[in-house]
Amino acid sequence: MKTIVTFIILAIVNVSDSFSQLATLVSKNEKAIFQIFSYDEFGAPSSTGTGFFVKSDGTGFTNLHVLKDSKYAFIRDVNGDFYQIDKITRVCEECDLAEFEVSKKDKPFSSLTLSSNIPLKGSDIFVIGNPEGFESTVSKGIISAIRAENKIIQISAPISPGSSGSPIMDMNGNVFAMATYQHREGQNLNFGYSISCKNNLITNTKYFLSNEKTANLYVLNRVCTTESGLILNSIEVNEKNTIINLTFTNTSLAYGEKSFIYTAIGNNDESFYIEDKISKKKYYIYDATIGISPKEPTWLKLGESKRFKLYFPPIGNVNEINIAEGMQGSDWSFSNIVLSDYKSFQFEDKSFFNNFYYQTGLAYLSEKEFAEAYVILNDFSASNNDNDFAHNLAGIVSFILGNNLDAFLHINKAIEINPTNDNYYFNLYYLNLNAGNNQEAFKNISTAIQLNNSQPEYYSFRADLYMEKEYWKEAISDYNKFINSDRKIPSSIYFQRGLAKLMIEDRTACKDIQQSYDLTTNEDDRKVIYDFYKKQCK
């Protein structure tokens, strides 16, 4: 019995020593590991990852995919200090490895020791990274397998969005691999490339950052207060023109694949304009990279994000502006913008990165990477529980991934935070309709109309519910509002209004049936409508 007790004591001591060793290594090595913030040409967040210094002069490593589509990039170290990435110096596309340099500072940087010696399969390892924005997170695991002629290392330590580029270290603190990707269909199937890939680095002639060219780019990344799917990323001011860079995300469940955006050009009553707040002079839009009418719009699928540009005449030295438009059905406006408050990238202002992960979720959506977007948005909304935009978007992605329960929870939370946003009620309408709760759906769409009676599509959706209730006059009234708008009206709307009119013996019903027939291009539908017309409109 005495021998057993001694053995247990020795085991506890060994475990304690192991934890102490790891804690010491983490404390030392995390000083050389940092978070990376990447932005696209719009000044919009495009990706996040992890990197580490390999030289004290500011030379660092990360995954190439973290930086390759970036125009602007910065790092934040464990102390919260920010540095600008100057350039990508060398790359290895096969191993997804990028070497880069940050802005030089007076003091040397802490750096990690690299090792080409891969520990044996089953050996303990640890990773320090920034998964989903949780800074300097340590995860411990083992080497699960060594594959592809010692090039790919499989580990049990978790890898999540934001961990890309994290150093994989042995229990001496040496970096022998870099975390790169995980297998989505399994648990703890995480992979990295051996650090020996550094021997394959070649001079970069393909991927270029533009940090030195941001003098006339004012980066705002500001969410529109009246349209949560719209973000004003940046404003570029030059001698030739003024360019407004925006992102729109289809966050309307009921529109599904049929959501669209456009901007009118040449009609000052509807067009976008920049207003000089001091002189009240207006500069009207003259070109855009999206559709320019509701009949020729830019279409977006559910959850899809679209980056686009609006072009205006040069505004010169104007500093205080409003941006507004007169398009029917929404309010895409941004008020009280003082450009001098947004001088290029204010990356030394820590508050500048507050919504980075929310907008990184949008970047994943733009690439249709819904699972990654959900991880980012769900965690962001959990840690920013008062952010209605994030909850609404997390609800959209939940629905896309087939998780209706989370979709209800997130969108109801968005409404709780901001009960004046019509789009949230519109989304709740669709969730209830999809679940067969038509009475609740009717309440939701009616609330959306009450909050925003200039959105023509809302009336067509409520009219369909009136048809189910056999409230013919109310249905006709709502269909009228949609048909009399500036939208392109589908054949089915005229047919539905014609049916409602027939039920109250309105003599104009057959004109609607005829209009429906004229607009229909599908031959089977044309035959059905024709037979119906012959029977009802003799």
Image (cartoon, grey):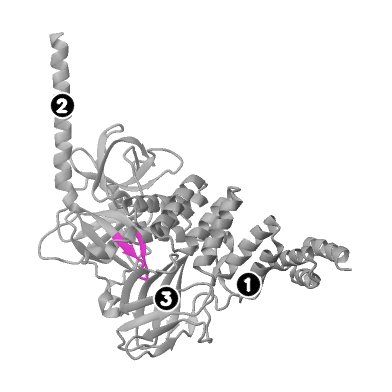
Element type where label 2 sits in the image: helix
Q: Nearer the viewer, residue 293 or 35?
A: 293
Left or right of residue 192: residue 463: right
Left or right of residue 297: residue 211: left
Q: Tag 2: residue type?
A: Asn
Q: Is residue 186 above or below residue 415?
A: above
Q: Nearer the viewer, residue 408 or 140?
A: 408
* Mark found first going from the N terminus, 1 or 2: 2
Residue 427, how many percent across, how many down?
51, 57
Mark 1 or 2, closer to the camera: 1
Q: Nearer the viewer, residue 108 or 271?
A: 271
Q: Quadrant of the C terminus?
A: bottom right
Residue 525, how many percent across, how many down?
78, 62
Which numbered tag is attached to residue 333? 3
The residue identified by callout 1 is 481
Q: Tag 3: residue type?
A: Ser
Element type where label 3 sits in the image: loop
Residue 32, how many percent across, how many down?
18, 52
Residue segment shown in magenta: 37-47
